[in-house]
Image (cartoon, rainbow, N blue to C red):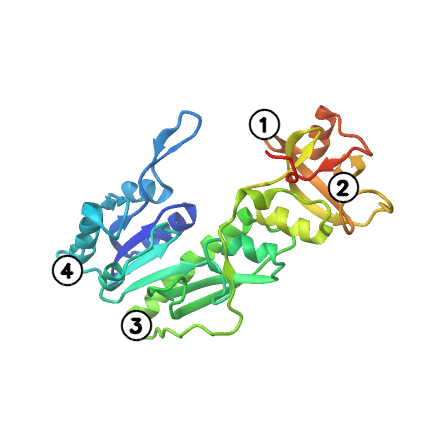
Amino acid sequence: MTHKLRIGFAGTPEFAKVALQGLLDAGYMVDVVLTQPDRPAGRGMKLKASPVKELALQYQIPVLQPLSLRKGEDAAHALEALNTAADGQPLDVLVVAAYGLILPQAVLDAPRLGCLNIHGSLLPRWRGAAPIQRAIQAGDSETGVCIMQMDAGLDTGAVRLTRLLPISLTDTAATLHDKLAALGSTALVEALKEMEAGQSMAEPQSTVGLTYAEKITKDEGYIQWTLPALELQRTLRAFDPFPGCSTLYKGEPLKCFDPRCVTVDGLGKAAGTVLNVAPEGITIQTGQGALLLTSLQKAGSKRGPAAQIAQSIGIQVGDIFESIGQGHSA
């Protein structure tokens, strides 16, 4: 299929790579890609290209990696590219997905039809940096993607298309990320086809239900066992894999994953007490109810079955998992 729209793409991580691949598979001409500069990664800290850059190079798409879009030679070069990438003419649309840089007004105005953003929530709920994690942490039963016409505000633009996605009780940030990436890719292509056909309308966001998804901090992953089991279960899922949720066992940090709320007799036991060690995992008393952990990770080691790790480090019924903080650090 031949498409009329000439497109640029701005994105960096895997979420954005899925969207870019969807555009290419649908036959869209992507004339230029903007992505974050290569960063040190791995044990050797060698420079590594972003997933979006790797894909763009496979398709021989020109790649720009400006440190800033606001000032300097990089910014001027990027703006010039947006204005000339379509055979010397401005692009029709710049698609933005998890790019990592704020777009100044000059960039927003450069494409003929403006900039479209793939946002992983049901706007106006969870505007901001961590919509996937915050939706799980809050116990939302559904989320989705919005294809948004970008403006100068933080995820405040009018929405062209919305697609819903249920959140399962076992979803983590990783699994929900992958589902939303796939949904966002198909929604983006659908929205672009509607724009080409003159059938797309951008609806202003509602003023009801507005929430902000603040950036995740490492400290939020420190488990406070005095909290209810349901709240901890949601947080452990939300922060899997990053930053992971950590406790202390005999003074050593231990990350906890794959939690389930369970009903056991922990009456009179202090929060953080190990109630059971079994093949399916270890059960911990919380401030209200108990939590079964089925995966653990020691510092410097790989994540593995909780029963195996419990045996390797000697976790027994009656032991105490301590909360990091209040004098502890990790």
The circle on residue 274 is none
Q: Which residue is mark 1?
A: 301
Sequence-wise first label, 2 or 1: 2
What amino acid is labelled 4 in the image? Gln
Q: Which residue is mark 2?
A: 284
The circle on residue 89 is 4
What amino acid is labelled 3 in the image? Ala
Which label sits in the foreground, 3 or 2? 2
Residue 203 percent location from the top left of the image? 40, 75
Which label sits in the foreground, 4 or 2? 2
Pick the residue in front: 211 or 86.
211
Residue 270 percent location from the top left of the image? 80, 42
Does residue 240 show up? no
Around disc 3, counting alpha carbons within 10 Å, would you say few (fewer than 14), some (14 to 19), or many (20 or more)?
few
Element under label 3? loop
Does residue 86 show up? yes
Task: Tell me the quarter of the image containing the N terminus.
Answer: bottom left
Residue 269's place in the image compared with 102, above or below, is above
Q: Viewed as shown, does residue 229 lie left or right of 94?
A: right
Gap in angstroms between the C-alphas marked 3 and 1? 53 Å
The circle on residue 197 is 3
Sequence-wise first label, 1 or 4: 4
Which picture quadrant has residue 60? top left
